[in-house]
Image (cartoon, rainbow, N blue to C red):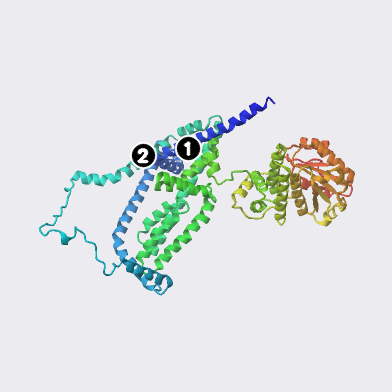
Amino acid sequence: MPDLKPKSAERAILPSGSSSAGLGVVGMIALVIAALYVGREVFVPVALAILLSFVLAPLIRLLQKAHMPRALAVIGVVLVAFAGITALATVMATQVTQLAGDLPRYQVTMREKVQALRGSAASSSALERAADVLQDLGKELDKPHVGATPPTNPLTPSTVPATETKPIPVEVRQPDPGALQTLGAFITPLIHPAATTGIVIIFVIFILLQREDLRNRLIRLAGSHDLQKTTAALDDAAGRLSKLFLTQLALNAAFGVVIGIGLYFIGVPSPVLWGILAAILRFVPYIGAFISAAFPLALAAAVDPGWSMLLMTAALFIVMEPLAGHVVEPLVYGHSTGLSPVAVVVAATFWTWLWGPIGLVLATPLTVCLVVLGRHVEQLEFLDVMLGDRPALSPPEIFYQRMLAGDPAEAADVAEEFLKERSLSVYYDEVALAGLRLARADALRGVLNEDRLERMRATVEELVDDLSDHPDQEPQSGRTDDPEAAAAVEASEGESGRADLPSLALEDLNPRFRGETPILCIAGQSPVDEAAAMMLAQLLTKHGLKARVESAASLSVQAVARIDDAGVAMVCLSYLDAGSPAHMRYAVRRLRRKMPQARILLGCWVEEMDATAATALQEAARADVVATGLREAMALCLDMAQTEATGILKGPIAISAA
């Protein structure tokens, strides 16, 4: 009783502390956003400089390998890069000036095309007649009432005295501007872009010159307790970002060149301008290609008296954008940039609101930087969780959540994507079984009651039935695009789980295993143990050994006597933990009394159990064999099914994951 007050006091304090910490984090985020908004004149050039440094760093490393001094390499690469940017800006300005001079000529064609559209439209249509009726009604309502006398205005000309003179118009003119004023009006619009460009150049040079020093300072901020890990993480992040941005720049530039050449042959004016604009706007996610297509489409409609130029321009963008986005990009740098689709949209909205149009162009690169930092810096892991395309939960946790929610259909969809690259036994062993272990752990902690466990068992039963058509074999081809399935496949890389177990024909079996159901899978204690037994029974059936499943209730003293043991050659006990050796021993003893002719396999589905522990468990439970994974249990059953009638085993007594 004396312990109750401290515990209740602790519970009362924890929410307050956690809420204070949460408010502190929210306040810090708000402060950072406010600083980015207020200081955008400084932060925008810094962001541009950082992104350009990622693009230019590989070129500088190549020059350094050619024994060029670092300072000379940095200055040379930066000057060449900005000379190229300046040349592109000059070309765009020239094209815009030329286009502005030709616009009056295009207005006539556009006006004639609009009039032709109006003339060709069916004037007798219902909408046209409705518009005419509404227009006539509006005119009638605007007419003055017949016979009404307009009100007398004392200020009308008829009441003004004849002797009053009309006011003299006055025009105010500014004096002609001097030479200094003209020069100032010309220079003022150029000051801000020139200053921003100068700041970017200076920042790029210093970032590239002091790259290692800046990295060391970032390591210090991120945590210097593990220099090797932090250094490797930052180097990996910098290399990945450099490769991503350089590749994206090359692809977008190639896209712009193709668009410009295509528009040139189609005959759209200023094709160089639209090609450069298409390359730039393609950095904008989702809507960039549509924006870049809108201008040449409108111009094609204005230039050509017919519609062929417009249709060819539309076809050019319709063909090239999907080809670049869905064929070339996945081949070059994968299926995505590492961002979730929602994160891309949110990032574009956020950076546009914060920094305007330049923020829209920089949204994806800046967010990619944040996600990469979140994957390598522990303090920033929340950025990867919020913005990255990797699932926030591990594959077993996702499976467990689906089973808790009673959603076998979605779990089956992810499983089928997984089965494009891995076998069914790998999925059951490394994803489903691991998820069931999480459920068993929660049940032991008392947070899962019997009803929810039974619901999970029923959900797993539906999932197993949905996957009954898939053979347990290595997939011949195919690759998943599902993020959850891809994460599960990545987690299974290098793990044991190849579909190398044979499928036995009836003539290959020991006569004792040729019955209707020669293998009996029995749950140890809980409904989730029964769920694991269902998976094992299905896998055995796919390899030529028929099996059936019994619930944990069949292990009671009264129920064991009622088990149908006709033709049973082997019993597989299913446990998701090794915490009840006494229960295992009594279960084995009861089964031996009931079926003395059957071999007993103890399946203890524990993630980490070496051979010594498995042997000790086998001796404590007095089982014939012990397995810690579904594939191991299948290998033992297949081995026993091929032995001679004497029942002598070919394989070892105990097999473990080690």
Give the side of residue 315 with respect to residue 465, left or right. left
Q: Depth check: 435 or 630 in front?
A: 435
Image quarter in which the C terminus is found: top right
Residue 273 against residue 76 in the figure, above or below = below
**Cα distance, mark 1 to mark 2?**
27 Å
Residue 649 in view, yes or no: no
Image coords of residue 353 (percent x, y)? 42, 46
Q: Quadrant of residue 289?
A: bottom left
Residue 555 against residue 470 in the figure, above or below = above
The three-letter code of the residue at mark 2 reads Ile
Q: Depth check: 494 or 546 in front?
A: 546
Task: Please report the residue visible at 30 percent of the width from the left and 58 percent of the height from the top.
Answer: 100
In front of the other: label 1 or label 2? 1
Q: Mark 1 sits on what residue?
A: 29
Looking at marks 1 and 2 on the same chain, the residue that comes earlier in the sequence is marked by 1
Q: Mark 2 sits on what residue?
A: 199
CB within 8 Å, label 1 to label 2: no
Image quarter in which the N terminus is found: top right
Give the side of residue 519 with respect to residue 391, left or right. right
Residue farthest to the left, as pictured = 163
**Label 1: how many Cα within 10 Å (few below 14, some 14–19, many 20+):** few
Image coords of residue 644 (percent x, y)? 87, 49
Secondary structure found at label 2: helix
Return the mark for residue 417: none
Image coords of residue 417 (percent x, y)? 63, 53
Residue farthest to the top, as pictured = 2
Image coords of residue 427 (percent x, y)? 68, 48
Secondary structure found at label 1: helix
